[in-house]
Amino acid sequence: MVIIKSAAEITEMKLANRIVAEVLTDLEKFIKPGMTTAEIDRRAEAIIRGHGAEPSFKGYGHPPFPASVCISINEAVVHGIPSDRVIIKEGDIVSVDCGAYINGWHGDAARTFMIGQVAPEVRELVEVTEQSFWAGFAQALPGNRIGDISSAIQKVAESHGFGIV
């Protein structure tokens, strides 16, 4: 069942998502070769808490997730746990999934960053992934179903020789 949100609820939802957007925008400039994924996590948590919000993922689940963001590097698909042992290298692609909880609402988004010079096939993968996202976004319309969104995403990816995980 779909519950229609009030203007006040939508405002609060936007606040949570603005915090997430700020974190991801900051990390785009912050992430550099030689740093650890734990450093990225600490930076994200500081920004989230600086807005009076809580990291959505930290402590979630059983066992509880130990970090504020999920960070996946290269072939890792999702939900990588930040670590002081995982070091970012030139040519990596780093995906950060961020969530912030404030005033009863969660904001959640992910972004993938290309670190320095990446191989042409890696750049193509990242660019096609973004094109696929926007194709799906264009299908997020009243009356459409999740299948319409996922079909649009899959068509773009497969037209470039990529598959969906």
Image: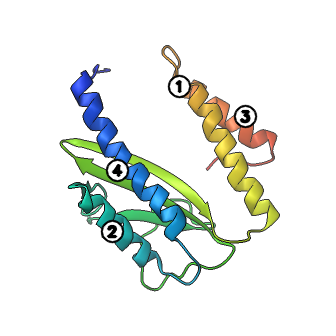
| Front label number (4 vs 1) | 4
Q: Are marks 2 and 1 in contact (CB under 8 Å)?
A: no
Label 2, label 4: how many angstroms apart (C-alpha)? 17 Å
In this rendering, the label closer to the viewer, 2 or 3 = 2
| Spatial CA span between label 4 and label 3 | 32 Å
Q: Which mark is residue 5?
A: none
- Determine the CA span between mark 2 and mark 3: 34 Å
Tell me: residue 22, above or below residue 27.
Answer: above
Q: Earlier in the sequence, mark 2 or mark 1?
A: 2
Specify which label sits upstream in the sequence, 4 or 3.
Answer: 4
Residue 67 marker: 2
Q: Give yes or no for contact between labels 4 and 1 (Cβ–Cβ under 8 Å).
A: no
Residue 163 showing in the rendered view: no
- Looking at the image, is mark 2 or mark 4 nearer the viewer? 4
> Which of label 4 and label 3 is nearer to you?
4
The colouring scheme, among rainbow, by chain, secondary structure or one colour, is: rainbow
- Which quadrant would residue 8 be assigned to in this image? top left
In the image, taking residue 117 as reference, residue 69 lies left or right, namely left
Res. 19 mark: 4
Q: Which type of secondary structure does the marked residue at label 1 adopt? A: loop
Instruction: Look at mark 1 in the image and give the residue it sits on.
Output: 140
Classify mark 4: helix, strand or loop: helix
Please name the residue that numbered disc 3 is placed on.
155
> Furthest-top residue in view?
143
Between 96 and 158, the residue placed more toward the observer is: 96
Instruction: Say whether residue 83 is visible.
Output: yes
Which residue is painted at 60% across and 32% down in the image?
A: 136
Q: Nearer the viewer, residue 164 or 160?
A: 160
Residues under labels 3 and 1: Cα distance? 15 Å
